[in-house]
Image (cartoon, coloured by chain):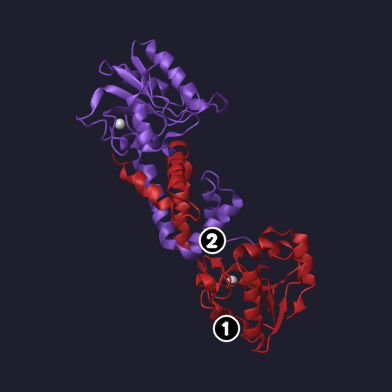
Chain colours: A red, B purple
Amino acid sequence: MKPPSALSLLVDALRVLPGVGPKSAQRMAYHLMQHDREGAERLGGALLGATRRLRHCERCNTFTEAEVCEMCLDEERDPSLLCVVETPADQIMLEQTLTYRGLYFVLMGRLSPLDGIGPREIHFDKLLQRATDGVVREVMLATNFTNEGEATAHYLGQTLKARGLVVTRLARGVPAGGELEYVDAGTIARAVLDRRTV
Amino acid sequence: MKPPSALSLLVDALRVLPGVGPKSAQRMAYHLMQHDREGAERLGGALLGATRRLRHCERCNTFTEAEVCEMCLDEERDPSLLCVVETPADQIMLEQTLTYRGLYFVLMGRLSPLDGIGPREIHFDKLLQRATDGVVREVMLATNFTNEGEATAHYLGQTLKARGLVVTRLARGVPAGGELEYVDAGTIARAVLDRRTV
Ligand SMILES: [Zn+2]
Ligand SMILES: [Zn+2]
């Protein structure tokens, strides 16, 4: 006996989700088909909509549906200040502190040589081009305070300083080993204010 | 700053998956958009395909794309023997033992009064109609050997016996507290052979 093909295709496809193995894929599929077909349809549409509509901002590299994202077009922001974060979630956290009024660059990752993630994978050339546009004066490194985040900050700091830019790092108000998106906004706010030259 | 709408729709929609909270939905969305758009598109299509094509078999209640599933139409199976299981996964496990040649009824759940799951939710009327078609002689209860599975077997056994049917239960070769889909096929095979009248 084989399960119907639409069902086995679904079980198989659910395994693209990080951390979902064959058993939990099967449970998810049965759950959706038995108890939440409306939700399954909504998720299906959202996945197709996102893959078709989302691209990377030409300036800051975050996800956007336009060529350039809303924040990069915001004339109220200070274009001389560029904050480098690992992920869009980190950017959201920083915005919630209400202490930063510059622009961003989102690496969409962090250096991790053992996983094959080098400068190319974190879009280093795009960052370099962005940071050397003649308007940016200071680059604030806000990668995570994990080993990989620190190594990424070190690499970026060395390279950007060599181009004559002022490079700062969030102050160590952020707990060592901490990941920005799990830290409270008050701690991050102080770290922004105390940022130091690298 | 708000995330782009296609992205926030996706993060929101991923929460229909059992056990997925806001943080893991965000991680899943970023992962798919950053590293596996092809997989995301495949999953989206599979979800829409499954919601549109899957229905319940009119005879055995399992998922199928036709009115009646392939197994119910298989003339090699013994129509006088009906095995009741909780889920399609349990049915697949039983088939793998190669010890059972009758037909099935899939409850798509188990009695659980505290969760509001009563006879209606496990399609009891449909089972009753199926079991009293004049052809079925024996109903073999293969619900799980958990508290809820045992209670379900007890309820079904009482009601079906009152209709004059022979009702059997898988032998207690299945470890107490065990869930069929996690038990090895050999143990289940012996339990099928040793099934006892209730
Ligand atoms: Zn942008
Ligand atoms: Zn069927």
Question: Which three-letter amino acid code belongs to the residue tagged 2?
Answer: Tyr
On the image, numbered disc 2 is attached to which residue?
Answer: B30
Is A130 drawn above or below residue A148 in the view shown? Answer: below
Please indicate whether residue B195 sits to the left or right of residue A92 in the image. Answer: left
Secondary element under disc 1, as helix, strand or loop, is helix
Is B156 drawn above or below residue A64 in the view shown? Answer: above
Name the quadrant containing residue A138. Answer: bottom right
On the image, numbered disc 1 is attached to which residue?
Answer: A129
Residue found at x 34% / y 42%: B53
Q: Position of residue A123 (x, y in %)?
A: 54, 76
- The chain ID associated with circle 2 is B
Please indicate whether residue A186 sits to the left or right of residue B159 in the image. Answer: right
Marks 2,1: beta carbons within 8 A? no
Please indicate whether residue B14 sits to the left or right of residue B172 in the image. Answer: right
Q: Is residue B59 visible?
A: no
Q: Quadrant of the C terminus of chain B?
A: top left
Is A13 drawn above or below residue B189 in the view shown? Answer: below
Looking at this view, is B94 or B48 the one in front? B94
Ligand 2: image quarter = top left
Q: Which mark is residue B152?
A: none
Let me know if marks 2 and 1 both belong to one chain.
no
Question: Which three-letter amino acid code belongs to the residue tagged 1?
Answer: Gln
